[in-house]
Amino acid sequence: MDLNTFNLYLFGGTGDLSNRKLIPAMFRQETLGNIDKESEIIGLGSREISKEEYTQMVKNSLEKYFPSFKDNEEAWTRFGQRLNYIKLDISSSEDWKNINNIPKDRPVVYYLATPPNLYKQISTSLKENNLIEDNCRVVVEKPIGSNLETAQDINNSLSAGFDESQIYRIDHYLGKEAVQNLLALRFANTIFEKSWSNSAIDHIQITVAEDLGVEDRGGYYDETGALRDMVQNHLLQILCLIAMEPPVSIQSESVRDEKLKVLKSLAPFTEETIGINSVRAQYLDGISKGEAACAYIDEEGVNAENNTETFVALKLEINNWRWTGVPFYLRTGKRMHSKSSEIVVRYKAVPHNIFSKEASLKADQLVLRIHPDEGIDLKLNTKKPGVSGYDLEELPLDLNLHDYHELGHQDCYERLLLDVIRGNPSLFVRRDEIEASWKWIDNIINLWESEDVPMEEYISGGWGPSNADLLLKRDFRSWKNGSSKK
Ligand code: BG6
């Protein structure tokens, strides 16, 4: 790999995201020798601390969040030397003068690891202080708004300083190896494409289940809910990669163009369909990972009156030639049975069974596992060995990526940060994608309220409310529950 030369400015450089994700991601790249000695990482924060104190803080957090930190002394010596700290109270025009000497000979990355309500001020001040040149990029995290209007506000704030080509909106799911593998599976192999449509596929399921509850984020989550927190971004992005047409190139804008077309083809829910094709629910107490777990309304920071959903299941349709007639079932929830994310592609049954009626002939099933055991599992009908005719059984062609690669420590932020440095935006979400997805989500939220769609309940540690099962049962289908390999 070419050595990467850059200056990375971390706004919120002493905060949680920097400590837990961004610094460890850059440090791992340091241990791999992928960072040029000229590169600098500059933390910015409102605290009055020295460069040495900041370096010590970074060291403390690496000791906590980077598992083999102690074994990487040499890398730490190099890393420590590239760290710097600038005190910045963003409302102080004096403090902005502390940022100077922005290099022109390398990519300059401004990572806004701050609450979104600061984006506008940061973006405008960077502009006013002449800190934005063509070699500069800005990176932002979700939440990008809580509806279309607020997302537009945030996008406008960023545009106040930066051109759209300089704005990198992170969806960390796009940094996951298994998610990127969806593109490789579809567009680096010929065998799937011809059958990747309503001619051969019966339906597709996308599940992103988490076993954890809201942990210490009760306050944020209670204002957000599962639809905004997970569906608007991660699940819709996965759906786009599964459903999109082949892009012209992986490096260009064309991946984003194709994703946008999917978002624009999503059939909107209506007053008639919202109550039938969507389920929202909240977790009750129960047993999670062998231990008693409290109900959502008893979590810290949660206001029971907000009636926030921690689980969503949707049956949706994509109105285009490829997918008309193929339902996509999406579900996500907190405090479910286990942490398991996967895509299940169920094929249609063969048109005519030439075997005996007793032969258990199942429709083929392709499972794309994102977590755990990243991999691909194709279930096929085979003949059981024996002399008594055709007794069929379903057996797997199972590819576990861990059998071939050491995926253990790599974090999605590593790939994404390097893509920003290299100026490759294809795994980032463009303004029009964000706004198209909010438009579709806003409609669901409005209909949930206007049609009074009930808030169901589910027991912690289970697979969600019974109405989510009914969503498929009504169509004579069922969810594939559980950890991937079974
Ligand atoms: C975040 C959500 O975007 O994704 C969290 O805000 C969620 O609520 C997390 O827990 C899940 O990410 P992962 O990578 O652990 O599946």
Image (cartoon, rainbow, N blue to C red):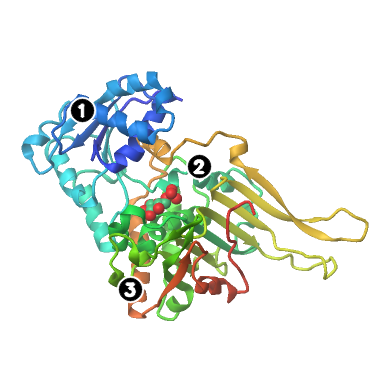
| Vertical side of 450 occupied by 44: above or below | above
Cα–Cα span, label 2 and label 1? 35 Å
Identify residue type, mark 1.
Answer: Glu
Q: Quadrant of residue 67?
A: top left
Q: Quadrant of residue 415?
A: top left
Q: Front-most of 79 and 274?
A: 79
Residue 401: x %, y % from top left:
59, 40
Disc 2 to disc 1: CB gap under 8 Å: no
Left or right: 189 with respect to 448? Answer: right
Left or right: 397 with respect to 28? Answer: right
- Find residue 53 and name its label: 1
Residue 176: x %, y % from top left:
47, 44
- Find residue 299 and name its label: none
Left or right: 155 with respect to 465? Answer: left
Identify residue type, mark 3.
Answer: Asn
Q: Nearer the viewer, mark 3 or mark 1?
A: 1
- Find residue 446 and name its label: 3
Mark 3 C-beta closer than 8 Å to ligand 1 = no
Quadrant (top left, top right, bottom left, bottom right) of the C terminus: bottom right
Residue at (43% x, 66% y) in the render: 285
Disc 3 to disc 1: CB gap under 8 Å: no
Residue 442: x %, y % from top left:
33, 67
Q: Front-most of 25 and 299?
A: 299
Residue of label 2 = 177
**Label 3: how many Cα within 10 Å (few below 14, some 14–19, many 20+):** few
Residue at (22% x, 57% y) in the render: 153
- Whether residue 356 is visible: yes
Residue 329: x %, y % from top left:
52, 65
